[in-house]
């Protein structure tokens, strides 16, 4: 049986997050709003208009090769002027083992941003979750519909203005779910 030894010194060396941020600033100077660093994590804050171009560049550039979307989520900055939401993309290069966080600002009156599903197929469910929980519409998404809440649910539970105790009125499907659970109780396994 042959033993395969991997020497870390022979693996390709990745870039520091600050170097990746500089490359983004060089290639998209009119799109970068800020580069923020907090607890050794670098975020590039960008305008939403060119998010697919920026992400495609990060994915396709052979020196960056950010081929893995680790996570896509949103943040609600309720009460903040101009921009209420940010869509956050945590990107990673499997080949180079470097990473960067991209934060795209999305205004409240019309919370829309282009989908990145054509770049990373795994963004599909992440974008659906952001749509469901925050009400952010991902333009060009192949199947944008609720993923966690029932289709007829009103509101978006992760928005800061969503009532802590939920909606004032009971969800219309609640009685049906309770009745179905009662009927199916006889099939529960007690092992």
Image (cartoon, grey):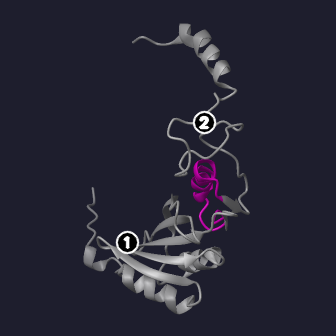
Q: Is residue 20 above or below residue 133?
A: below
- Mark 2 lies on a secondary structure that is loop
- Which range of residues does the magenta coloring cover? 115-136
Instruction: Categorize mark 1 by other alpha carbons within 10 Å: few (<14), some (14-19), many (20+).
Output: some
- Residue 97 image label: 1
Q: Which mark is residue 167?
A: 2
- Up the image or down, 32 lies above or below 184; here it is below
Q: Give residue 149's mark.
A: none
Residue 120 x, y percent position in the rendering: 59, 64
Q: Residue at x 26, y 61 (%)?
A: 3
Q: Nearer the viewer, residue 1 or 115?
A: 115
For residue 170: magenta?
no
Residue at disc 1, secondary structure? loop
Residue 48 percent across, percent down from the top left = 62, 74
Q: Nearer the viewer, mark 1 or mark 2?
A: 2
Is any part of residue 124 visible from this angle?
yes
Classify the position of the C terminus by image quarter. Answer: top left
Badge 1 or badge 2: first in the primary sequence? 1
Residue 14 appears in view: no
What is the quadrant of the N terminus in the image? bottom left
Residue 125 is covered by the magenta coloring: yes
């Amino acid at each position: 049986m042959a033993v395969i030894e991997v020497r870390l010194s022979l693996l390709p060396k990745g870039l520091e997050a600050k170097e990746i941020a500089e490359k983004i600033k060089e290639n998209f100077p009119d799109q970068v709003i800020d580069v923020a660093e907090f607890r050794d994590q670098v975020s590039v804050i960008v305008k939403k208009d060119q998010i697919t171009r920026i992400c495609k560049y990060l994915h396709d550039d052979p020196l960056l090769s950010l081929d893995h979307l680790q996570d896509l989520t949103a943040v609600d900055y309720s009460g903040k002027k101009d921009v209420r939401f940010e869509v956050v993309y945590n990107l990673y290069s499997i080949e180079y083992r470097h990473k960067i966080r991209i934060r795209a600002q999305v205004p409240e009156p019309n919370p829309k941003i282009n989908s990145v599903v054509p770049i990373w197929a795994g963004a599909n469910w992440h974008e659906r979750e952001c749509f469901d929980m925050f009400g952010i519409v991902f333009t060009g998404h192949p199947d944008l519909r609720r993923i966690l809440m029932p289709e007829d649910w009103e509101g978006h539970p992760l928005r800061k203005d969503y009532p802590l105790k939920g909606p004032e009125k009971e969800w219309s499907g609640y009685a049906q779910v309770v009745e179905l659970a009662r009927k199916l109780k006889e099939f529960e396994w007690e092992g």
